[in-house]
Image (spheres, rainbow, N blue to C red):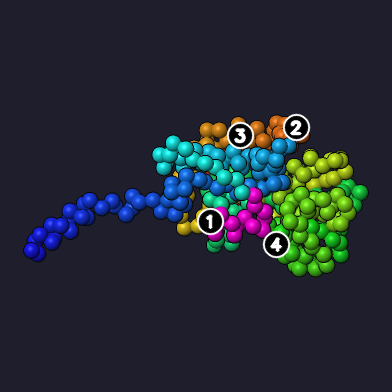
Amino acid sequence: MRFLTLALVAVACVAAPARSDELTGTLKKIKETGIITLGYRESSVPFSYLDDKQQPVGFALDICRKIVDAVKTELKLEKLDVKLNPVTSATRIPLLANGTVDLECGSTTNNLDRQKQVAYTNTHFLTATRLVTKKSANIKSLDDLKGKTIVSTAGTTNIKQMNELNTAKKLGMTILSGKDHAESFLMVETDRAVAFAMDDILLASLVASSKDPAAFEISKDALSPAEPYGIMLPKNDPAFKKVADEATAAFYKSDGPALFKKWFQQPIPPKGLNLNFALSPQLEKMLSSPKDSPDPAAY
């Protein structure tokens, strides 16, 4: 009987699928539901925003769709439905952490603090914090902001940086928070704030799409080191991250410059604006040697 029992156990072990081959986490959820949910931003031009038909488009969304294709192939699915869910700077991490969205396709800085809650795939852009002001305000330096009201967007690294600078340099600024980038920029347009602190590329897009682009200027001096943007994914989900990492690395190496040209150097919807943003050597290196590091020095 003892030998028979051992034999049956051995047969059961052989018949049972290896645990390492079983789907877990996000891939399991997607396989079971046939749905993958992308979080998008409504005004982060050109990364993720609404076009004239109120449809989400952008550089980061194109990247996310490549990840979707890779997930579909990995799971051997004939069909994979894509659900689009709006997120803001304040809601993007909670909605990713609680499973409402599977990928956050936007303009989110990859840093060590956020990595306590989420993971990132390979970096798709590098930016730095600068100020946009009206030329008529004659703001030339941080010292010119003493005692003035500025704005940044809630839930961003930029508003944290400005609070730290405000304290360190004893500027006495009043720092307001906009719900999204469009609202923050509107505060400068309507003189509720003299400056908007945000990532330089986002400021460039907001100025280009404003009613009077010539009325604004972006500070030459950066207020932060270069910051890497990445597509956010759930934390502690190595299988899903592996699919995303392999897909983005291959895509950046083969089509990265072309995708960059599409969104940063050509007219984009809905108004046919051209941001004329150069592919710098640093950005070119980033696309040719993909990595997910939060360290600016890595790029």
Mark 3 surroundings: few (<14), some (14-19) or many (≥20) residues within 10 A: some
The residue singled out by tag 1 in the image is 99
Task: From the viewer's side, name the closer residue of 239 and 146.
Answer: 239
The CA distance from mark 3 to mark 2 is: 16 Å
Q: Are marks 3 and 2 in contact (CB under 8 Å)?
A: no
The CA distance from mark 1 to mark 4 is: 26 Å
Q: Amino acid at mark 4?
A: Lys
The residue singled out by tag 2 in the image is 272
The CA distance from mark 1 to mark 3 is: 29 Å
The residue singled out by tag 3 in the image is 259
* Eye-nearest disc, 3 or 2: 2
Residue 120 visible in the displayed image? no
Residue 74: image location, x then y, percent: 42, 41
Mark 4 surroundings: few (<14), some (14-19) or many (≥20) residues within 10 A: some
Numbered label attached to residue 160: 4
Q: Which residues are magenta?
A: 86-100
Q: Residue at image x 53%, y 56%?
A: 99
The CA distance from mark 4 to mark 3 is: 31 Å
Q: Residue at image x 82%, y 50%?
A: 186
Residue 55 visible in the displayed image? yes
Numbered label attached to residue 50: none
* Eye-nearest disc, 1 or 4: 1
Q: Residue at image x 10%, y 59%?
A: 4
Q: Are marks 1 and 3 in contact (CB under 8 Å)?
A: no
Q: Are marks 4 and 3 in contact (CB under 8 Å)?
A: no
